[in-house]
């Protein structure tokens, strides 16, 4: 049976389901979200699959049904079950244990991530706290951070983030007793797959949405531009974006003054037209 898409490129089962359905429907147009509900034995619940993609909990019985519909072999089925365990774990300890299982089951675990990297990129507030430590004098009491961080994060999650940064060697106390970053910036590194970074970026895009919908209490720039250009002009624009990113990194790294703010900068450029299959240059 054609697998349509490689399950081992994923660490989030909902993302895998979404992309599997999209890939298979190109080959089998009848393989719609409604049809998946039928195949799962839920002909009267057309929204179930969409609800799962949005975060609905999946029972063990339905996990088995999904495995049948997806046509997974024994190893792939176990990997899928573990992805579900990672997503639905009720505690950080259970999630980390499930993630370790996932790494053991992956044919090339060095191409995914290590468990600490997974934790770091799985929650946006980890990177936010990393930057906040540079902009604020933060001791063991994280209440001042919890009061100011946007969007709001519980004190417990911030404490977990600080413990993670310490464990990764990304933060340590200075002579005054304040937690400070041990380096200027963080790269995703060679052990993180694109899927994990996509999930992190989706969280950052959601932050932009919340910032847009919330009356600004700090400097905010929101700009949107829709345009039509040639493929050659697009290449020039893409180069200009890369040049801007490089310039932004230089400005950030060369800033010698004490940081007093933490900002998100997201760049999105995508096509509103699918490729028609012709030669676009």
Image (cartoon, rainbow, N blue to C red):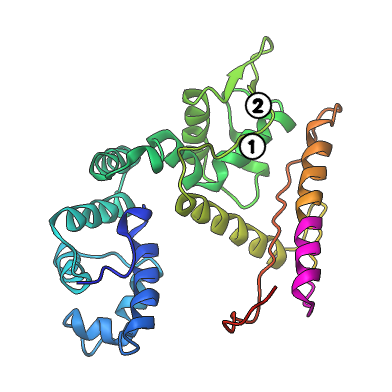
Quadrant assignment, res 143: top right
On screen, 257 above or below 93?
above
Q: Is there CB contact under 8 Å for labels 2 and 1? A: yes
On screen, 87 above or below 262?
below
Tell me residue 61's x, y (percent).
14, 67
Q: Quadrant of the N terminus?
A: bottom left
Using a 10 Å C-alpha cutoff, classify the residue at mark 2 as few (fewer than 14 neighbours), some (14 to 19) or many (20 or more).
some
Q: CA distance from mark 2 to mark 1?
A: 8 Å
Q: Which residue: 32% across, 42% down? A: 108
The reply to whether the magenta stretch includes residue 96 is no
Any mark on residue 138, and which? 2
Of 33 and 230, the residue lying toward us: 230
The reply to whether the magenta stretch includes residue 238 is yes
Tell me residue 186's x, y (percent).
61, 34
Tell me residue 106's x, y (percent).
28, 45
Using a 10 Å C-alpha cutoff, classify the residue at mark 1 as few (fewer than 14 neighbours), some (14 to 19) or many (20 or more).
many
Any mark on residue 145, and which? 1
Any mark on residue 104, and which? none
Q: Which residue: 29% across, 40% down? A: 103
Tell me residue 168's x, y (percent).
49, 26
The segment highlighted magenta reads 225-240
Which secondary structure class fits the magenta region best? helix
Tell whether 69 sits left or right of 239.
left
């Amino acid at each position: 049976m054609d697998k349509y898409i490689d399950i081992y490129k994923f660490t989030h089962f909902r993302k895998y389901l979404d992309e599997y359905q999209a890939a298979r429907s190109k080959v089998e147009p009848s393989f719609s979200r409604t049809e998946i509900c039928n195949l799962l034995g839920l002909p009267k619940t057309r929204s179930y699959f969409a609800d799962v993609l949005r975060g609905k909990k999946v029972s063990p019985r339905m996990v088995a049904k999904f495995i049948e519909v997806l046509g997974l072999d024994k190893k792939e089925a176990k990997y899928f079950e573990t992805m579900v365990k990672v997503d639905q774990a009720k505690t950080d300890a259970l999630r980390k244990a499930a993630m370790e299982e996932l790494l053991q089951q992956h044919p090339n675990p060095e191409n995914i991530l290590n468990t600490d990297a997974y934790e770091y990129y799985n929650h946006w507030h980890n990177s936010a706290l990393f930057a906040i430590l540079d902009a604020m004098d933060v001791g063991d009491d994280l209440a001042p951070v919890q009061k100011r961080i946007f969007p709001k994060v519980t004190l417990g999650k911030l404490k977990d983030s600080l413990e993670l940064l310490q464990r990764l060697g990304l933060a340590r106390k200075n002579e005054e007793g304040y937690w400070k970053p041990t380096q200027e910036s963080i790269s995703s590194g060679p052990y993180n797959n694109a899927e994990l970074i996509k999930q992190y970026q989706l969280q950052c895009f959601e932050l932009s949405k919340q910032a847009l919908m919330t009356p600004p209490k700090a400097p905010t720039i929101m700009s949107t531009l829709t345009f039509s250009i040639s493929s050659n002009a697009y290449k020039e624009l893409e180069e200009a974006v890369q040049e801007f990113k490089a310039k932004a990194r230089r400005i950030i790294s060369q800033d010698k003054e004490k940081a007093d703010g933490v900002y998100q900068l997201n760049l999105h450029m995508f096509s509103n037209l699918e490729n028609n299959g012709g030669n676009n240059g």
